[in-house]
Image (spheres, grey):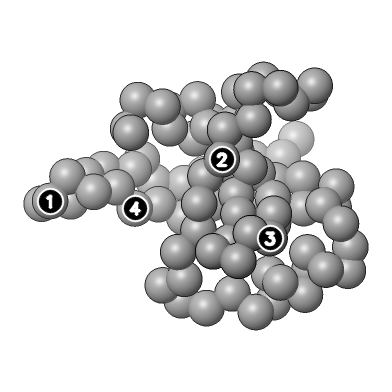
Amino acid sequence: DQIEMFPLPRPDAEGCYATHFLLRAVRHMPQPETEERIARLRPGEQLFPVPEPTNPVDPGAVLVRTGDGASIGYLPAYLAADLGKLQ
């Protein structure tokens, strides 16, 4: 069995949430471009969640993109389901 444990996201004093997670489905993104773009990520770089309601595998999927439009993977399903509640 694969088990991942992460702390429960909690809001800070300003009501903002921060959490750490592993991107999903990176291997399904265009290669080697995706791996190269991930390697160039920098601390503090803004990433953008993009809901994908037409995703044939998971209509609740949320793609993660960089500011320059590179798709680098997906939010884990356990976070994607809650994203709409936080916006």
Give the residue at x 18% y 51%: 12
Q: Nearer the viewer, mark 2 or mark 1?
A: 2
Q: Are marks 2 and 1 in contact (CB under 8 Å)?
A: no
Disc 1 residue crowd, few under 14, some 14–19, many 20+, Cα 10 Å = few
Which of the marked residues, 4 or 3, is nearer the chain's N terminus? 4
Q: What residue is disc 1 on?
A: 14
Q: Are marks 4 and 3 in contact (CB under 8 Å)?
A: no
Give the residue at x 60% y 49%: 64
What is the distance, in whole Å, between disc 4 and disc 1 at their CAs? 11 Å
Q: What residue is disc 2 on?
A: 50
Q: Could you tell me which secondary element the residue under label 2 belongs to?
A: strand
Q: Position of residue 65 (x, y in %)?
A: 60, 54
Q: Position of residue 43 (x, y in %)?
A: 46, 76
Q: Is residue 32 left or right of residue 21?
A: right
Disc 3 residue crowd, few under 14, some 14–19, many 20+, Cα 10 Å = some
Tell me, for residue 18, which label it has, or none: 4
Q: Could you tell me which secondary element the residue under label 1 belongs to?
A: loop
Q: Position of residue 73 (x, y in %)?
A: 69, 50
Compared with residue 87, is residue 35 higher up or lower down, i.e. above or below?
A: below
Tell me, for residue 70, which label it has, or none: 3
- Report the amino acid beneath label 3: Ala
Disc 2 residue crowd, few under 14, some 14–19, many 20+, Cα 10 Å = some
Which of the marked residues, 1 or 3, is nearer the chain's N terminus? 1
What is the distance, in whole Å, between disc 2 and disc 1 at their CAs? 24 Å
- The front one of 66 and 39 is 66
Q: Is residue 23 left or right of residue 50?
A: right
Q: Position of residue 46 (x, y in %)?
A: 45, 64
- The front one of 69 and 40 is 69
